């Protein structure tokens, strides 16, 4: 008689799970693949049996059998930015519903780090890649790191030469809306604060700001265009640059919400109050924008929805690989809150 102490435990199979909950093996397989053909009641019963039996799905083996990866790589340029944290959450939500796993990488705005991350993720053979590029990225080099066979979706920044689908916000129109809002309140000295002009999204937002000023017959002073890293800390540190020379601005269109929140902190350090002595607008409408002091006027981009949209676009590309690259531009809308005011408000 074999010694039970040295016998390997028998591996739980799909047939065991099917027998345990009274369904067919095919139904269990559909549950594993998250098929919509299975009713919620049956799915719950099968998943409970998985847990009871301790069944572990060998996804790698399934990928080999189907010759199709069940993962999508997501590479973010600045995961510390709340916008991208929300965006990543949206990507993961949509991929999970479709039965995919998210492989996450962060580059910290480093082109070299980005190249290393993409090459490392490629070893896991993702079915597709979603990339928010680091500043200064080269499209041809990115495509080489990703591989010519993997669908690539570029988010937020332009990436020439990457032969990829592209999803971005309508940056110019958003900044134009914010600037027009400040002009309507009576401001004529309006700054554009934050971001780097080397970034396509920053250039597009600046273009919208300048277009709105031109339409109103206004000309910005050179010292009203202040570049900073798009972070709260850097924006707070550079706030004083707005007031070094006359005429000083009375309002600012900020590159993003992180910059706007940093500017409001910097204003307080300078003895000014956002929404009272100085008007501030942001861009993105991150969750904190509505609860900041004062609540921030901003452009709603719904980053979590943009993440779900990016995931859906990559999954759609997997079904239509032969179609040419598609560019998607998403409109944004102004949300007026207490951080903006008329220039003569007491």
Image (cartoon, helix red, strand yellow):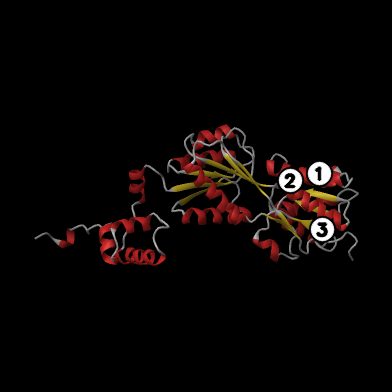
Picture residue at 73% right of the left edge, 50% below the top: 174
Pointer 1: residues within 10 angstroms few (<14), some, or many (20+)?
Answer: some
Pick the quarter of the image with the C terminus: bottom right
Element on which disc 2 rests: helix
x and y percent of residue 106 in the render?
Answer: 55, 48
Residue 121 position (above or below residue 285)? above
Q: Residue at x 29, y 64 (%)?
A: 53
User: According to the image, label 1 marks what residue?
Assistant: 211
Mark 3 residue element: strand
**Res 112 quadrant in image:** top right
Seen at 77% across and 45% down, the residue is 208
- The circle on residue 279 is 3
The residue that label 2 is drawn on is 172
- Identify the residue at image location x=74%, y=61%: 296
56 relative to 199, above or below = below
Q: Observer-nearest residue: 168 or 58?
A: 168
Report helix, strand or loop for mark 1. helix
**Disc 1 + disc 2, Cβ < 8 Å:** yes
In the depicted view, which residue is nearer to us: 183 or 252?
183
Bin the neighbour count of mark 2 within 10 Å (Cα to Cα): few under 14, some 14-19, many 20 and up: many
């Amino acid at each position: 008689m074999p010694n039970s102490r040295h016998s390997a435990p028998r591996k739980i199979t799909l047939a065991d799970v099917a027998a345990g909950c009274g369904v067919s093996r095919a139904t269990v397989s559909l549950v594993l693949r998250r098929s919509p053909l299975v009713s919620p009641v049956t799915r719950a019963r099968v998943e409970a049996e998985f847990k009871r039996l301790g069944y572990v799905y060998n996804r790698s083996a399934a990928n080999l059998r189907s010759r199709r990866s069940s993962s999508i790589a997501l590479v973010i340029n600045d995961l510390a930015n709340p916008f991208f944290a929300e965006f990543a959450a949206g990507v993961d939500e949509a991929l999970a519903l479709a039965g995919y796993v998210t492989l996450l990488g962060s580059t910290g705005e480093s082109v070299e780090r980005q190249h290393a991350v993409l090459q490392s993720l490629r070893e896991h053979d993702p079915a597709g890649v979603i990339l928010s590029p680091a500043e200064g990225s080269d499209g041809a080099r990115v495509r080489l790191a990703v591989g010519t066979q993997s669908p690539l979706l570029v988010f937020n920044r332009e990436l020439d030469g990457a032969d990829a689908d592209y999803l971005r916000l309508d940056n110019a129109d958003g900044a134009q809306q914010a600037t027009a809002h400040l002009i309507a309140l009576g401001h004529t000295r309006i700054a554009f604060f934050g971001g780097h002009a080397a970034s396509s999204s920053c250039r597009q937002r600046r273009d919208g700001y300048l277009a709105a000023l031109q339409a109103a017959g206004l000309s910005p002073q050179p010292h009203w265009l202040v570049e900073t890293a798009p972070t709260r800390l850097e924006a707070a540190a550079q706030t004083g640059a707005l007031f070094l020379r006359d005429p000083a601005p009375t309002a600012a269109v900020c590159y993003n919400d992180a910059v706007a929140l940093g500017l409001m902190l910097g204003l307080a350090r300078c003895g000014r109050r956002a929404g009272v002595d100085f008007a501030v607008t942001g861009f993105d409408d991150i969750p904190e924008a509505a609860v900041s002091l004062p609540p921030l006027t901003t452009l709603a981009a719904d980053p979590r929805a943009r993440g779900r949209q990016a995931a859906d676009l990559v999954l759609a590309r997997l079904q239509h690989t032969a179609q040419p690259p598609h560019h998607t531009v998403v409109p944004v809308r102004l949300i007026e809150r207490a951080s903006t005011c008329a220039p003569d408000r007491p």
